[in-house]
Image (cartoon, grey):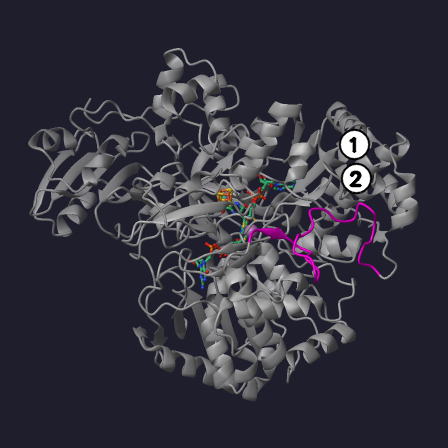
Amino acid sequence: MNGPLTSPPSVNSTCPYCGVGCGVAVAPDGAGGAHVEGDKAHPANLGRLCSKGAALGETLGLGTRLLHPLMRAGDGPLARTDWDAALDRVASGLAAVIDRHGPGAVAFYLSGQLLTEDYYVANKLAKGFLGTAHVDTNSRLCMASSVAGHKRAFGSDTVPGCYEDLEAADLIVLVGSNAAFCHPVLFRRMEAARAKRGTRIVVIDPRGTETAAEADMVLPLAHGTDAILFSGLLVHLADAGRLDAAFLDRHTQGFPEALAAARALAPNATATARGCGLDAADVAAFFRLFAATEKAVTCYSQGVNQSAQGTDKVGAILNCHLATGRIGREGMGPFSLTGQPNAMGGREVGGLANQLAAHMGFSPAEVDLVRRFWSAPRMAEREGLKAVDMFAAIGRGEIRALWVMGTNPAVSLPRAGAVRAALEGLDLFVLSENVAANDTSACRPHVVLPAAAWGEKDGTVTNSERRISRQRAFLPLPGEVRHGWWPLAEVARRLGFGDAFAWTSPAAIFREHAALSGFENGGTRDFDISGLATLSDAAYDALKPVQWPVPADTAAGTARMFADGGFFTGDRRARFVVPAPVAPPQGAEGLPLLLNTGRLRDQWHTMTRTGLSPRLSSHEPAPFVAVHPDDAARLGLAHGGLARVTSAEGETVLEVRADPRQPAGTAFAPIHWSFANASHGPIGQVVQARTDPFSGQPDSKATPVSLAPVPAPFEGVLLARSELAPPEGVWWARAALAGGFAWRLSGTVGPEAWASWFRGMGGGDIIEMTDAAGGAYRAAAFDAAGRLAAALFVAPAGTRPNADALKGLLGADPVSPEDRRVLLAGRRAGHGAASGPLVCACFGVSKGEIEAAIGSGCADVEAVGRALKAGTNCGSCVPEIRALLSRASLEAPAPRPKADVAA
Ligand SMILES: Nc1nc2c(c(=O)[nH]1)N[C@H]1C(S)=C(S)[C@@H](COP(=O)(O)OP(=O)(O)OC[C@H]3O[C@@H](n4cnc5c(=O)[nH]c(N)nc54)[C@H](O)[C@@H]3O)O[C@H]1N2
Ligand SMILES: Nc1nc2c(c(=O)[nH]1)N[C@H]1C(S)=C(S)[C@@H](COP(=O)(O)OP(=O)(O)OC[C@H]3O[C@@H](n4cnc5c(=O)[nH]c(N)nc54)[C@H](O)[C@@H]3O)O[C@H]1N2
Ligand code: SF4
Ligand SMILES: [Mo]
């Protein structure tokens, strides 16, 4: 939130981050920035925003953007080119690969962050006109198990409920979801429901999360055992007489077989508890609570989907809701929480390799239907390769041309090291990107195309509750940036398909997509928005958020589905799923720990946007691996030291965090860092490529790894106004800081080597201090105007100075003589002691300030909020404030004393 709210024109749009799909009201400042606040009229958030949404204004700058097309000649470097040359190269390159190797040698790798319109065009070009079904998306890593699970049970990929169900529920079960961090505004709605009607919240997650800290009941089950737990629940519901016989009879098929299989897997609460590594009394209590509470919603996310048994986990959850008829009615139902802003839209247009378009598959009748609708000359007739297999085929040279749009696979795919090598071997690698540099653009693309970013993008997205909302542009397209669909249509035109790609606006693309959804539908397919197929351009511009289906002659949308059956199977009955026997993930020879990966509160994926915000970057400044303190002790890992994390795929080095909330035998690392901001690159290098047999979704939550200490006798902090490359051999992680960057440093490089590196940077006016005996070096460099250009503090391990107090010094002003004097002491004149990491990102309140407020008598979250405003906006930091208040759940080994280097 920057600057005062100027008077309108304000533009209503949708947040580009998570699948909650919050509406935002944006007031552009006329200088490329904007004030962003929650849209009070948007049904997803009713005015609320989380820390990421509230900081959107800080991420709009053009400093890191790609503004012109780039192209590489032969083995040369990427160089600026014009659109015509770039598009000619893409078109001729695709044609050449198809001529030589056939359409199956061409692939597209798309993203749930693309608009529906962009996605529709890419899918149409590939599957209808180039004739390749190798079109997959990062949603394969995200929602594919939910899609497969929905289709097996419902005959369609339908999310039955809506957000209002969370407010009407008496029980919310969160399975494999850290909603407090990942779907914060929805989590606030859940907490509001609890305050209002006493809704109970149960969290099922192996790891102690901020979400679990807020729950009424926590089941820390062993990784991969969710299908056992929900099979046990199904048995309990049957034995406790909680089945909905009428619903079972009228609307389902296969219950006896599913129940028998569940009995074999989990005959009672005791056996279930044993299978899941849980306490039998806890399991029994959860079963009783679920059985007794009709209005129950089960939300699930990546702990369910990203699993080698993800589809069966989804099936086991759906079974319990189908058996009790708790589906599609107010306050009840299974609820897949989608990750990306347009994960759902991608599914609607057929962005997955095993889907065609408009929720159709590859049956001959569906292929024929789409062929006729598109007048497609070269329809793909069979499913294509799913992401992990697609990149393996690229690695083997079977796929020769790839177009990546809106995703950073060199970071986010499992086996990231192999992915990088595969990308570098392509005959044609096209990348559509927002940013000038990321790990994927470092893999030698031939053509890089500048794509519109949030604020410039114009189209639609669909959130977790099937709600289609407009993302509206409020900034002009900068440089030579173009909308995502435009180069696709231009390439199609160059290949002779101009007539089928002749749209001039996203509205026209949307109308075609809506028309296809209704084409020969007759109620046979869930996804039907033909009621929107004749929207005028003006009506499209003004489109209010609406939940599909929106069949022809209606405009109202549909809140809930399946209360009265009507599933999309041949006989309109839902299918019970028999889960396969569960083999929970285990460590391997020499790799005894299971590595879980996931998200942090204030970063989005590979940080290309949230990483630009100093506010968001101060919550967690560096990549880490969390382990139980007993494991840390056993493995010789020091809290705050470095560990090498090694798997069968590769390795990386991370800072150690001993955390009692981490189950023994497991480790957890966040997914956000990459070579763009950390010396040892992404955790994806370590993550296995084991996939679910139905969905093809990789299991990113349980990779067998080993951890070993990496010697790091020295630690340090570097602040600088501009990008610097720390010396070879140093472990570092870089974060945004007001006025520049801050690096966290560790390793074997000692004071003398640091001193010569710092002097060698050529800064004019340097002050420095070497404490040879103490092993410390401190220095600062000033530019001609007397402003701080860089500051370096190096000290023995365990005494890294706290740079928080220095942050303001990178501002625009010359450093006062007084500040210069104390700078090397790691302080700022007139400023108190460093106050630790930021807890409340919305109001910039640090841990130290909250602790001080607690010390001076604030006894609860509300009192802290009154004193400091912390926690009163988006609320995502409330769990942390509560933890500081109770100190119970955060009893990590006391952080080593941060030496005040002045002392
Ligand atoms: N701040 C932030 N929010 C985001 C994103 C982001 O990058 N940052 N990304 C968005 C996207 S694309 C997505 S997909 C969502 C993901 O949202 P979530 O799925 O909530 O997030 P994750 O951290 O990936 O994983 C959730 C939890 O699954 C648990 N888990 C691991 N294994 C198991 C298991 O076997 N069983 C169970 N029950 N739980 C398990 C993990 O311990 C973890 O706490 O977040 C979205 N929101
Ligand atoms: N180990 C592990 N790996 C994971 C996960 C995990 O939990 N553990 N989670 C997986 C999941 S659920 C997800 S969703 C993925 C996310 O992984 P990615 O999709 O790779 O992550 P992002 O950082 O969102 O990458 C988006 C890229 O596209 C660019 N971009 C953003 N918007 C646009 C646009 O509109 N057009 C274009 N052309 N470019 C754009 C951004 O600059 C950025 O470089 O990671 C997956 N990988
Ligand atoms: S919860 Fe946060 S990240 Fe998700 S859509 Fe809303 S404001 Fe954006
Ligand atoms: Mo995701």
Find disc 1 in the rendering and name its residue. Answer: 294
Q: Dot 2: few (<14), some (14–19), or many (≥20) neighbours within 10 Å?
A: many
Relative horizontal placement of residue 348, taking residue 646 as reference (left or right)? right
Q: Ligand 1 near label 2 (Cβ, under 8 Å)?
A: no
Q: Dot 1: few (<14), some (14–19), or many (≥20) neighbours within 10 Å?
A: some
Mark 2 in CB contact with mark 1 (< 8 angstroms): yes
For label 2, the SS is loop
What is the tally of numbered marks visible in this picture?
2
Magenta segment range?
544-569
* Residue lying at 62% horizontally and 75% vertically, measured from the top left: 127
Note whether residue 422 is visible.
no
Depth check: give the residue in front, 197 or 114: 197
Relative horizontal placement of residue 310, taking residue 811 as reference (left or right)? right
For label 1, the SS is loop
Q: Residue furthest top?
A: 857
Question: Which corner quadrant holds the N terminus?
Answer: top left
Main secondary structure of the magenta stretch:
loop
What x and y, as percent, mark residue 306?
A: 63, 50
